[in-house]
Amino acid sequence: MTTKPELNLGSHLVPGLAAIALFVVMAATVLSATFPDPQGFAGDANIVASIGYAMFNLDFGDVAGESFLAALIVIAVTLDVALDGSIHLARREGDESGPSLLADGGQELKRSLFGEDDD
């Protein structure tokens, strides 16, 4: 006999409700935010230099600074944490020398290059 699935209202429901609450708060924040009119570059402006000046909030270029430096730092730190995490996950437990792309740890390549035996 087949039984229909039951809804298990246990402690695993709390993280789901927290995620829904976070989504509602973020959606309300984004929908209620006001954004200024976008700025464009002048027709004869050096676009690369203007982007650099705008990013670091310098008033030397043709575009007024919008202070993207904080966003740049947040993105850099996030990418650094992701890279460090991927390296940490790639390491083998108990192997302090780090991961090896070769199945034998490079011993066969070492023997062929340097003529050394694996004593």
Image (tube, rainbow, N blue to C red):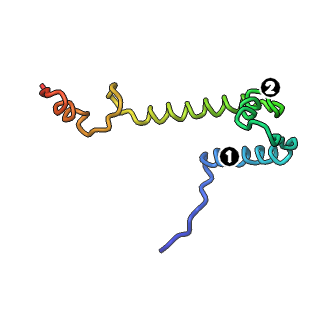
Query: Who comes first in sequence, dot 2 or dot 1?
Result: 1
Q: In screen coordinates, is 106 left or right of 55? A: left
Q: In screen coordinates, is 10 left or right of 30? A: left
> Residue beneath label 1, please?
19
Amino acid at circle 1: Ala
> Residue beneath label 2, please?
60
Residue 1: x percent and y percent?
47, 74
Disc 2 to disc 1, C-alpha distance: 44 Å
Which one is in front, 2 or 25? 25
Which one is in front, 60 or 29? 60
Quarter occupied by residue 4: bottom right
Q: Residue furthest bottom?
A: 1
**Helix, strand or loop status at disc 2:** loop
Q: Is residue 98 above or below residue 44?
A: above
Total numbered labels placed on residues in the image: 2
Q: In screen coordinates, is 100 left or right of 30? A: left
Residue 69: x percent and y percent?
72, 28
Task: Name the residue rendered at 12%, 25% in the picture.
Answer: 119
Quarter occupied by residue 118: top left
